[in-house]
Image (cartoon, rainbow, N blue to C red):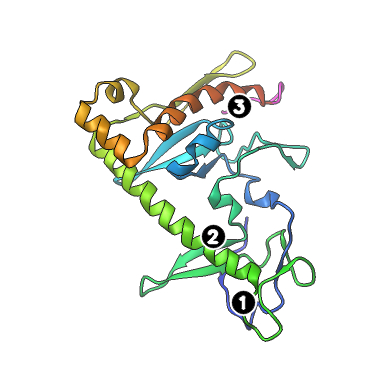
Amino acid sequence: MLAQPVVLNNEQHKDLHVLAQFSLESVNDRHIAPLMLQEFAAASVFYPIFFLQVEEVFAPVAVFGLKEGQNLFIKDGQWEGQYLPAGIRAYPFNLAQANDDQLLLCVNEQADNISRTEGQALFNADNTPTEFFQGVNSFFKEYIDANAISRNIVAQIKEMGLFKADGLQYRDLAGKEHRLNGFFVIDREKFEALSDEQFLTLRKFGVLQAIYAHFNSLERIGSLINRLPVDAPAAQ
């Protein structure tokens, strides 16, 4: 289990450094990872993209495994995935919301890519932010803006009634059939039946490429199945 992140400050974390290495623990037990619409084109080449419903909100995710806790892109302790979703690239940093709704930058002090002696320093000797730390802040500012745009467009897709429940169905290498429930997809038939006005609205939002990437990504389910160990079932 990953350690609880803490809010960054220039006293407690004045000697923290970030290593250049990719953090395997950030994906080790993850069978899904959050995505933004802006990432669909790149992510769809490697991963199936589905949507989860959290209360009334639909959230896109990349699928790394065929059961909870399974990441089929890790082999022999190495990450074999290609595109890394922004939410994973951000590790060991994340954002937390304070009581006054202010967003605070947090860090996992125990992350495997955190060091007290090596790597990129977060603070200078006078406790001012380093150029690297300023880059982290810029990354999150861009991430917040992009995520807000993505959420708003997904809400528009929902308003058009385009989402449908569609569990991830597949047959494993032993020929046994499985189904993972809880996923949603964009209904292709409803999408193709949109009025000209609705279609132009989606085009105005610049979301058509992402929708087609979502459709194409569903072909990656076969690639996931091919990554299954021959002697290990995908799900119970």
In the image, residue 69 sits, relative to residue 144, either above or below, namely: above
Outermost residue on the top side: it is: 175
In this rendered view, identify the residue nearer to me: 105 or 120: 120
Does 228 sit above or below residue 63?
above
Query: Residue 13 at what x, y percent from top left?
Result: 65, 77
Magenta region: 229-235
Callout 2: few (<14), some (14-19), or many (20+) C-alpha neighbours within 10 Å? some
| Residue positioned 29% across, 21% down in the render | 192
Q: Is mark 2 on a helix, strand or loop?
A: helix
Q: Whole-Å distance between the Cαs marked 1 and 3?
A: 42 Å
Q: Which amino acid does label 3 sit on?
A: Leu
Which quarter of the rendered picture does the N terminus lie within? bottom right
Q: How many labels does the image show?
A: 3
Nearer the observer, 52 or 233: 52
Q: Earlier in the sequence, mark 1 or mark 3?
A: 1
| Label 2 vs 1, first from the N-terminus | 1
User: Residue 163, image x and y in percent?
Assistant: 31, 32
Secondary-structure class at tag 3: helix
Q: Distance between the residues labelled 2 and 3?
A: 30 Å
Residue tagged 2:
139
Q: Which residue: 65% across, 33% down?
A: 72
Expressed as whole percent of the image width and height from the top left, the position of residue 219 reads 52, 22
Q: In which quarter of the image is residue 121?
A: bottom right
Judge from the rendering whether residue 75 lies leftward or rightward of residue 143; answer left or right: right
Q: Which mark sits nearer the N-terminus, 2 or 3?
A: 2
- Label 3 belongs to which residue? 224
Q: Mark 1 points at which residue?
A: 129
Q: 17 and 145: which one is in front?
A: 145
Residue 233 is inside the magenta segment:
yes
